[in-house]
Amino acid sequence: MDYTTKLQNAIAQYKIPLLHITVWAVILLLPQILSFSDFRNEERHSHAQDTFFYLNLITRILLIGVFYINTGIAIPKLLYAKKYILFIGSQFCLFGIIIGVDYCVSHLLLVNHKFHFLKAIYYEAGLFILTALASITFKVLWDKQQADYRANERQKENLKTELAFLRSQISPHFIFNVLNNIVAMVRLKSDTVEDTVVKLSNLLQYMLYEANTEKVLLHEETTYLKSYIDLQSQRFGNKIQVITQFEGVEKSYTIEPMLLIPFVENAFKHGYGLIKDPVIKIGLKMSEAQLFFEVKNKYNADNVQKDKASGIGLGNVKRRLELLYPNTHSLTIEQQQDWFIVHLKILLKS
């Protein structure tokens, strides 16, 4: 890690304390801006200016203390608790302490100077009220910002939890379907069982090690998708005509893992059985950053029944799309004559 990176990390870590120190340093180093004490200005002709500077400096430091007492104690414990009388009383007490300290310091620094309480109250009240109002404004805005931040963090955690739950549902569902395929192939004494088991092993490896990441490369997801289609094609053989077309997936776009597979699973699930000349068409195309995904399958309306073991499917993927790609995706599902058609568009990032 280079020096610049370390400096940036340090600034990010201590930016709030640094901001407070900078603001108060500017205020303390520019007393002429904050000096509202006219009776002191009149006395400058007979007293050293540095004496009044120190006197003003002590008063400003006390006001800084008032600011943090308000933000740390008075506002959260009194004002937020709607104890308005106690809060106002606390402000009078703080103001009285400032006047008292001002009186003592004046006698120490200005021996021959007569202290005027009414003038001191008059000239210090404005800056004290300004400090009190600033502390209230700062505390309210700060607490609102922190509440919004915590709410956003809770929302993110809730979304992560929900996405993890939705994704965890897909894995056993997928394995269940593939194992059923293998059982069917074993019963048929197919010569491709070994090849199927190898492909299943590769898919399981993908699911265990790749699908747990937040995003995967699009070409990895399509490779997984093609392997699943191959497994299903081996199972059904010539009983289903499967037509696939993948274009533009070699680019380095990323996508949520196992997002597209439910549409293909649904097509194989409902695209076979009591259907004349079953056909499944699967197309994927990238145009710039836009993903176009289409799945079409012939279906028989009388044969579309929800399997008790599969109640995941399209409802799952719809929710995932809403969470992962809000306002950047379009999903349409329609039935045209004897065709069931899914159109999906997603704006991906590279």
Image: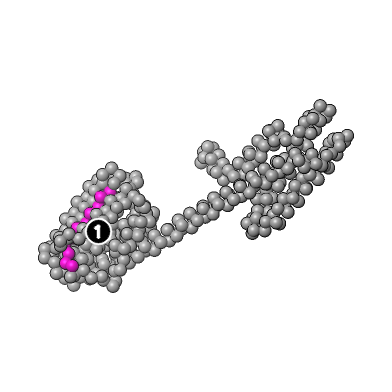
Q: Is the magenta stretch mostly helix, strand or loop?
A: strand
Q: Residue furthest right?
A: 112
Asked whether 88 or 27 is in front, the reply is 88
In this view of the protein, can residue 277 be seen by the observer? yes
Tag 1: residue type? Answer: Ile
Q: What range of the chain is rendered magenta?
A: 291-301
46 sits left or right of 267 in the view: right
Q: Which residue is drawn at 69% across and 44% down?
A: 129
6 sits left or right of 97 in the view: left
Q: Residues within 10 Å of mark 1 (few under 14, many from 20)?
A: few
What residue sits right under mark 1 in the picture? 333
Image height check: is 274 above or below 243? below
Q: Residue furthest top?
A: 45
- Give coordinates of residue 117: x percent, y percent: 82, 42
Helix, strand or loop at label 1? It is strand
Asked whether 97 or 109 is in front, the reply is 97
Task: Judge whether residue 324 is colored magenta.
Answer: no
Q: Which residue is drawn at 70% across and 47% down?
A: 66
Q: Which residue is drawn at 42% across and 58% down?
A: 159
Quarter of the figure with the C terminus: top left
In this view of the protein, can residue 211 be seen by the observer? no
295 sits left or right of 128 in the view: left
Task: Judge whether residue 296 is colored magenta.
Answer: yes
Q: Which residue is drawn at 79% across and 39% down?
A: 119
Q: Quadrant of residue 27?
A: top right
- Give coordinates of residue 36: x percent, y percent: 72, 35
- Give coordinates of residue 305: x percent, y percent: 23, 70
Q: Quadrant of residue 209?
A: bottom left
